[in-house]
Image (spheres, coloured by chain):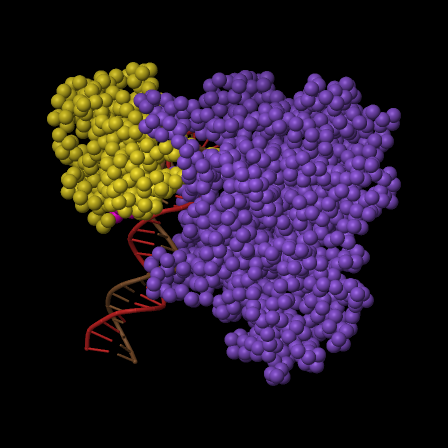
Chain colours: A yellow, B purple, C brown, D red
Amino acid sequence: MSLVTKSARELTQIQHYYGFRYVLNTIVHERIFDKLKVPTKYPNSDRLKVLDLYPGPSQHSAVFYNRYRPAQHLLMDSRPDFVKHISDLIARNKGCEPTLQLYKHDPYEWQAYTDLIDVDKVLSPSNCSRESIHDQFLVLANLTGMIGEGLFMQWLACIGNRNWLQRFGRVKILVWVQQCTAVKLLAKPGDQLRAKCSLVTEAFTETKLVAAMNTKKSGGGSANFSDNILSEDRPVMFDQQDVWPPSGKNICLLEVNPRDHSIDLDNFDYVSKHLLILKSTPLYDSLDSLGHGAKEYFRKVVQNQKLLEKCPKELTLAEFLHITEIFDKWPFKPDIYLDFIDVFQESD
Amino acid sequence: MLRYSSICRRSHGSNRIIRQLRPLSGTVFLQKPSMDSFGMDNRATSEDIGFLKSSVVSTAPGFTTFDNAQAAAQAGETRNIMNLWSLLEACLHSGYMDRAFSILKSLYGLKSHRASFIDDYNKFLAKFAEKADDLKAVDKKLFDDLQKSFPTVDYNDKTLAILIHNAIRLSDSQETRLKHCRTYLRMAVSGCRGILSNVEVLTVQDYRCLINELELIELNDLPADLTPLVVANNLSPENNEEPRRTAGGTDGSMIPQTQETTKPAFQEQVKAIPKNADDLLAVDTIGMKVVRHTLLGLTLTDEQRKQIKEFNFESASNLLNFENGQDNIDFFEIHKNLKTEEEREAFAKALDEFNQDRQLQLEHRATDAAKERWKHDFEEAKARGDLSIQKKLNVKLWEWFNQMLPLVKEEVKRCAEVASDSVQEGTLSAKEKKQNKARQDYGPYLTLVDAEKMCVITILELLKLNSTGGVMEGMRTARAVISVGKAIEMEFRAELLLKNESYVFKDINKKSHEFKLLVQRARNTFRSMKIEESKILWPQESRAKIGSILISMLIHVARVRVEGVDPVTQEKIQGEAPAFSHGYQYHNGSKLGVLKIHRSLVHQLNGERLVAAVQPQLLPMLVKPRPWKSWNSGGYFYTQSTLIRSKESPEQVAYLKAVSDSGAIDNVYHGLNVLGETPWTVNRKMFDIMSHVWNTGKAFLDIPGNQSKLILTPQPPRDADPSIHRKWKLKNKELANEFSSGRSARCDANYKLEIARAFLGEKFYFPHNLDFRGRAYPLSPHFNHLGNDMSRGLMIFWNGKRLESTGLKWLKVHLSNLFGFDKAPLDERVTFTESHLEDIKDSAENPLDGKGWWKQADKPWQALATCMELNEALKLDNPCDFISHVPVHQDGTCNGLQHYAALGGDVEGAKQVNLMPSDRPQDVYSHVAKLVVARLEAAAAKGDENAELLKTMIKRKVVKQTVMTNVYGVTYIGATHQIEKQLSNVFDDYKRSYEMSKYLTKHVFASVRELFEGAHLIQDWLGDCAKRISKSIRLDIDEKTFKNGNKPDFMSSVIWTTPLGLPIVQPYRESGKRQVVTNLQTVFISDPFAVNPINARRQKAGFPPNFIHSLDASHMLLSALKCGEKGLDFAAVHDSYWTHASDIDTMNVLLREQFIKLHEVDLIERLKNEFDERYRNYLQIIKIDKTSDVAAKIVELRRKLSQKLGRQFTLADEIYMEKKRIELLESEEPSENAEGAEMTTTVSLLGEIEDIGALEKSGDSSGIMVLAPLKLPQIPPKGNFDVRELENSKYFFS
DNA sequence: TTCGTTTGTACTGATATAAGTTATAGTTAATGA
DNA sequence: TGATTAACTATTGACAATATCAGTACAAACGGG
């Protein structure tokens, strides 16, 4: 039995969207899934489990559900207006009940996942080898709200750590994020917005732009994707009017494919964090901010002068990993676990 | 000679008054308020303690406010002037005369500054003349400048003084000298006395010359303070020997040698300055002989006699006992044992004289002393052949100093080159060009202080800042660069003062003891004058820039030996690394520049006694502080301090200046002086115990133990749940936080003990100043009576007083109070103490090995000190004979509420905070708890389960914090948190606990409200007023601020006058911070002269508590004043007043009297009148009912006007129109007057409405925004309590 | 020589940074009397 | 029906700061007639 969605009118009458934005036009979603070629990646849809985070109006979820009929499609949301809406939706489509469920917890809370999987045991994903992407478990999410960016960064860290949902294997995530976030994540060496999160994305995942908003007059208030990415990923383009609420920042859909890695996480974190502060200063000078005497050490150890002439934002992931390695071998390297500020307690 | 006639002619027109700040003209439509307008009855008026006079001044029409149209522009100009001034000063002292002259031209260009321009020019002229060798050149320069460059400026008396001084100096014959001086004196603008009063220009020698040789003036033309000096010098010509020269003395490093000239005549004079400076610094031989003689004449023990004979009164190293194992004379011991009043007096006098000199050294020689110590240690190590790898700290510092010095010198040279344009631009790289550009900015400042000193200061500042700002092994860069820059500035200022001083007094010899006293007095006057005069502050930007230059040089040279582990072989390896390193850390996603100190150096700093390297500054004073006389004159001798610690509020300073000049706040000064004149000494017995405990390194009471290193918890496995990782991070942060707060507590305690050690046996004073609400604080930050229990326990009054029987009683009460047993009647408290006499004896005699009863006290250290005092007293046959030194405290019971209750007239509330006589002291907290229980019971009776559950657990403690913080305007949520903390151990579920707390908070708030009904109405009223004022608009508001939509920036802060006349300006404005580029990084600093929009939220939240604090501050100062009058030694910690045990009764009467005096007037009514006066004709934006008649009329009017204008009629237009109307109405012209009355504006429409409040609509879209006259709400009704009942309430303070 | 035009540059303002989210005031929808 | 409360949203002086770059205004230099 097909999941019948509500009309656009009904959806726009939901009071609060909590700062999130959703594509309501189902045609856009159909095009997205056409492009994604889901069946080739999840051939056994009768064993596919989907965790859908912040589904909101659930148009995206509904199209997915109707197309692939996964074994289990779990919507996790705790926002009153959406909970009401989703409950209503499920109630209207009694036939979907066994496979389409709502779990009323806040996806922001780590505890929601342990409760879901380990305590309530509503969802039990299978373990999958790290050789390839998990083919029986998929995560859909919408992180277009205020907290979205922060939460996504943490998910990236989880991919690196192989914990959270990533403990079951390399679980693909289809996630809606703000365009400005995506631009940063996908920035290439040399880009103005090349940042630590670009490196992390590159190191832990293979991330592609699936769908993006048409930006006629470079609008949306933030930077646009480089032509490079647009031509490489050929995203599905959609319009302002496909999105609700009508005002807000541009959004886009990313496909995040976790990678396997063997990176020295803590040192990598320290080195990339510090170097990218002076992102346009040649390594000759910017390396000095890694600690007492770093400049002398690196100048002595690094033979490749060309490397030292580059500045951090131009470095590739490989070069960062190289520097991290050298840093780790430094006998006088600073304590990277003491790299934080105490609570401020100044009187005078 | 030149045509003086031309100058003279012009001078006739120069009857202008020279003013520093020309009042702005934007306030014409404000009427002059009179005393009557404050609605005071005669009784109050006749007894004005400051308020009336002061408030009239600060609401007067000519007064410059900060919220009008010109304010922003004016502020920009003020900033400009200040920057130019400091640059001018720097250039003059660096000898960059051309640059200085072009700065003068810029200053001349600023119109608002024109009136005081001549002062700037005089500075230039003085410097110019100093370098000249021919009077003609000077004269011509002046003439040309005034004619050509600055045609609208006239000379003044100081200009003439400069000419006279140089005429005397440069003339080659008595004849020309006479001729010139006569001419100049005739040109005087305000008589020859006007010229002669410029003591900072004319030397004593000049005066003598004018009187004796030239016979141009009479003795009584001189400034009064100088007369005896000139006379004395006249009468004793045999004393006119050369000043004593110190053999091989210091090379003049005290004074920057920037004034080398080639002219012999001048050279001689310049050289004399360093010599004299040195002379001033060294303690006078003759004087000290007398001191020694006086001391030996007293009744002393043989030991003391021997000590005094051997004591080197002249050595600067005997300044204070910062070195271990070296004992100074215990002056307190001598003082204590003197038997007669005469002896004590003689002793006090001698000691004071000795200390005058020591104080001077203390404030001056800090950096030199540090350097000398490094050098000493280095040479000692060298002599020993000690080349060990782990060098002693001081040895390292000396090495750094020596390596840094050439770099600094080189940089100074470069700057000089850039300044003199002697660099070939073409040959430089882009980077160097940029660097040279920067040098133009900071160069002038870098040459002011001797390079050696700058190095020492840089090193010292960085060491002092170790582990501050939340950075674990280092500091924040921004803080570091500014601190160094500021320290350089301070050094420059102090040196300048000293240089000027020695210049003025240069040819006075001080060999006669009597004469020396005269000099000292004159010198003090001079110093005050000089400090008051100095208003120049270096801009933060320049401070940061020179700070960063110096720091980057230190980073470059300072290296330490370090140990590391080879990652491959796991072997330990030795190496060398920079001691300091610049980097960044993140906090909440924002970058923070940090200057890290290498761990090995941090360890060393923790290990060695810091004071050995770092000389603490701003110590208590050895002599009475300079009394407060004006807003910036008082406190230390050479360090300028301001009356109010308004770091960045030029607004309050402006008010303060105006009010201070009118003499309206003398009571504030007097009160503050009383606090400063109370002499203290260190309680040696307490010190011995504490230092013993300290040296064990173990944790003891509030001294944390000595933790050597921070141990972090191990990282959880990578694939653990993210929540576990998060907990791990939090745990580590907490550990680090604990570690560093323990470390800083220990460091702080160390500071206190070291300072206490230095002051053992000394007599010292605490100079005080005020925070912006008028509360008094000691200036010395580390060691003062406001400190924690430990520092309080270390201090006793220098003067002793016989206990008498009342004193004995109070001492017992005091002990009981310190144990926390302070809610019982006095006799029960006495009984409490008496029932523990054994414990007291044991505690006093075996504090560490005994039962340690004292440790159970609330305030153990003070309790121990009191135990000892009591024990000593009780040993006597008659304990009343005991001479007591321990201060006894009287604390207000919830002082804030006391003031609120008095304001609100709440009878029951007043009773509960002991404003009414009662047999037993009342305890508000218990009472509120009782009220809450009653409410809960009532609710429970109605079947409320929560109430039923909670009603048994309401204890005093639960409500205490909430009641207390209620005064400070705690929010509902804040209070809920407090209560939750108290309840958290009852309910295990956080959610439930929070629920219950929320419920309970409601009842607590209701109970407090019930008890302090009137007070709360007033609190609300105050908040409401603040909100309206901070959202109000002045008519002459800058139109530019309308750019963002239809809402202007609000500029008016809440300003009021305390009963003592102190104007208070809430400094809550938007910060206006900017990024400033320095050598190391950009730093984010605020510009103190910017006038920014106010922060309405903080204005509102801050006003009620600030108002109350301004009242309790007034009460304290009034009490201090009265106690001072009665000859009591008085000290205070806001709402805790201290004096000798035997004087407590007197003090209690006085402070009750003062409280009554304060509250007899209806302060709230007076406040409202003041507000109405100050903010009259201000406007506010309100929302009124769309459907009302007025609204319709306004809409219609707007429509019409819009049509007429042919565009949208904006808010700015409305304001402008109303401004016009008011101007017409208040015009002198009757016709204009009538025209104004005819006018209809949107505001006048509303002005006709009686009750605007009724129309106000906060809600939805049915409202319309309109401009209305600012109208403050009606004063809430007051309860029936009469303050005069307080007179007999003995538990008011107890 | 004049007068566009380019070029350089000083200044301002915007944005990203990290990655568990602080509290609180003000608004609006919903709820209870 | 008005009022009261709960929930959401904005604001954010704790992004308790800093690097970078784009855009702009403005002066110097250029250069072509």
Asked if residue A142 is positioned above or below residue B201 in the image, the reply reads above
Q: Foreground residue, B351 or B261?
A: B261
Q: Looking at the rendering, which quadrant does residue B523 occupy? A: bottom right
- Residue B88, x across and y down, in percent: 53, 64
Residue name at image x 61 percent, y 25 percent: B696
Q: Which residues are magenta?
A: A219-223
Residue name at image x 53 percent, y 18 percent: B986
Residue name at image x 41 percent, y 33 percent: B574
Looking at the image, residue B736 sits to the left or right of residue A226; the answer is: right
Residue name at image x 75 percent, y 26 percent: B867
- Residue B268, x across and y down, in percent: 63, 67
Residue B773 visible to an observer of this rendering: no
- Residue A298, x across and y down, in percent: 32, 40
Give the quadrant of the C terminus of chain B. Answer: top right
Looking at the image, residue B767 sits to the left or right of residue A186; the answer is: right
By secondary structure, the bulk of the magenta-drawn segment is best described as: loop
Residue B489 visible to an observer of this rendering: yes
Give the quadrant of the N terminus of chain B. Answer: bottom right
Looking at the image, residue B567 sits to the left or right of residue B237; the answer is: left
Asked if residue B1227 is positioned above or below residue B1109 in the image, the reply reads below
- Residue B1057, x across and y down, in percent: 64, 50
